[in-house]
Image: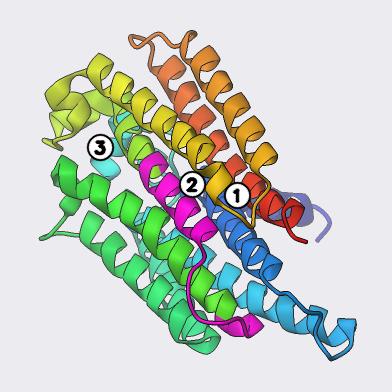
């Protein structure tokens, strides 16, 4: 028995690492931060302390956040997993390290994970309430249409981009805020700060959607996946990405004084620094080097993650 234990542990560790890669870690981190960030923004709207004990409040809020987080994470794995199942041949060219492309997971295992996560996402969301169910349900529906034939919207660059920034930008931010507002007993309605964050994320995820295709030209061309990077060229798309993200940061800097519940100084300073970091980083990108482009793509995901820390802090700093 002792001889088999290290092998079993190694096998389990290998399978967990393969699952981690299958879940696309950068999207998992983004989903986790978006749930936590939107909750923090909603919680900052609570003007008066709850009448019950802090222990009861903490438990209730932990359940509220926990259900939303696990439902969204399961939905995340469903969406990225389904995309990999339909893109095995393309990924063998563009992303050979992914578990299905490398053979670490079989297609049967991939389908089992995707089906389980999709079902869990819907069950958890249904238990969380109508706004969470609408958020997760719409996200899964769009994610399915994005990847699965015969619709497979990812074949069309405009529709592919719309799918990505509609889910990440509008559905997740607005749906989760309404879900948390309802759970916290807040008045109906969406404050200006949430609309500002939503517009920012819409533009930013549009840039992410464009940038993600730049290093994948070879596989997309071979399997007839039309992207803006293929039709317009790498350099024009890269410039559009920089322009979109810069416009997002500039928009928040200009709008900051009008966001009365948020700290103007914090928003201006942090977005100005992030904008400067973006332009410093882009100087090092060689568009003929796939690795350099991929590193820049991961960098803009880090900027995306940062926004879900910046905005909640702005709300709490601005709170009277």
Could you tell me how far apart the alpha carbons at marks 2 and 1 are, in whole angstroms?
A: 19 Å
Q: Nearer the viewer, mark 3 or mark 1?
A: 1
- Does the magenta portion include 203? yes
Q: Nearer the viewer, residue 48 or 231?
A: 48
Mark 2: few/some/many CA within 10 Å (<14, 14-19, 20+): some
Q: Secondary structure at mark 3?
A: helix
Residue 137 seen in render: yes
Q: Nearer the viewer, residue 233 or 169?
A: 169
Give coordinates of residue 135: x percent, y percent. Answer: 41, 72
Give coordinates of residue 33: x percent, y percent. Answer: 61, 53
Q: Nearer the viewer, residue 206 or 146?
A: 206
Where is mark 3, residue-wise? 90
Q: Nearer the viewer, mark 3 or mark 2?
A: 2
| Residue bounds of the magenta highlight | 182-204
Where is mark 2, residue-wise? 24
- Does the magenta portion include 199? yes
Q: Secondary structure at mark 1?
A: helix
Give coordinates of residue 182: x percent, y percent. Answer: 56, 83
Of labels 3 and 2, earlier in sequence is 2
Of labels 2 and 1, earlier in sequence is 2
Q: Secondary structure at mark 2?
A: loop
User: Residue at image x 72%, y 53%?
Assistant: 318
Where is mark 1, residue-wise? 308
């Amino acid at each position: 028995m002792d001889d088999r234990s290290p092998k079993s542990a190694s096998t389990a560790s290998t399978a967990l690492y393969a699952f981690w890669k299958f879940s696309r870690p950068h999207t998992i981190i983004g989903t986790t931060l978006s749930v936590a960030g939107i909750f923090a923004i909603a919680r900052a709207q609570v003007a008066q302390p709850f009448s019950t004990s802090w222990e009861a409040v903490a438990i209730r809020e932990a359940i509220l956040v926990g259900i939303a987080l696990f439902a969204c994470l399961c939905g995340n794995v469903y969406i990225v997993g389904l995309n990999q199942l339909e893109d095995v041949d393309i990924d063998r060219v563009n992303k050979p390290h992914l578990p299905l492309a490398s053979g670490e997971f079989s297609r049967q295992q991939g389908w089992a994970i995707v089906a389980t996560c999709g079902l869990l996402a819907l069950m958890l969301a249904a238990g969380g309430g109508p706004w969470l169910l609408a958020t997760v349900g719409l996200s899964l529906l769009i994610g399915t249409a994005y990847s699965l034939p015969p619709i497979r919207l990812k074949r069309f660059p405009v529709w592919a981009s719309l799918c990505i920034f509609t889910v990440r930008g509008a559905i997740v931010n607005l749906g989760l805020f309404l879900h948390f507002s309802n759970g916290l007993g807040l008045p109906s309605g969406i404050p200006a700060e949430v609309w500002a964050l939503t517009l920012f994320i819409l533009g930013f995820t549009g840039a992410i959607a464009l940038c993600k295709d730049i290093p994948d030209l070879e596989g997309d061309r071979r399997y007839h996946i039309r992207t803006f990077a293929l039709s317009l060229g790498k350099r024009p798309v890269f410039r559009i990405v920089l322009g979109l993200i810069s416009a997002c940061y500039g928009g928040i800097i200009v709008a900051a004084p009008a966001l009365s519940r948020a700290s103007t100084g914090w928003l201006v300073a942090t977005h100005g620094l992030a904008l400067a970091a973006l332009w410093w980083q882009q100087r090092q990108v060689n568009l003929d080097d796939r690795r350099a482009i991929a590193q820049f793509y991961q960098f803009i995901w880090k900027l995306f993650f940062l926004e879900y820390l910046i905005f909640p802090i702005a709300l709490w700093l601005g709170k009277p």
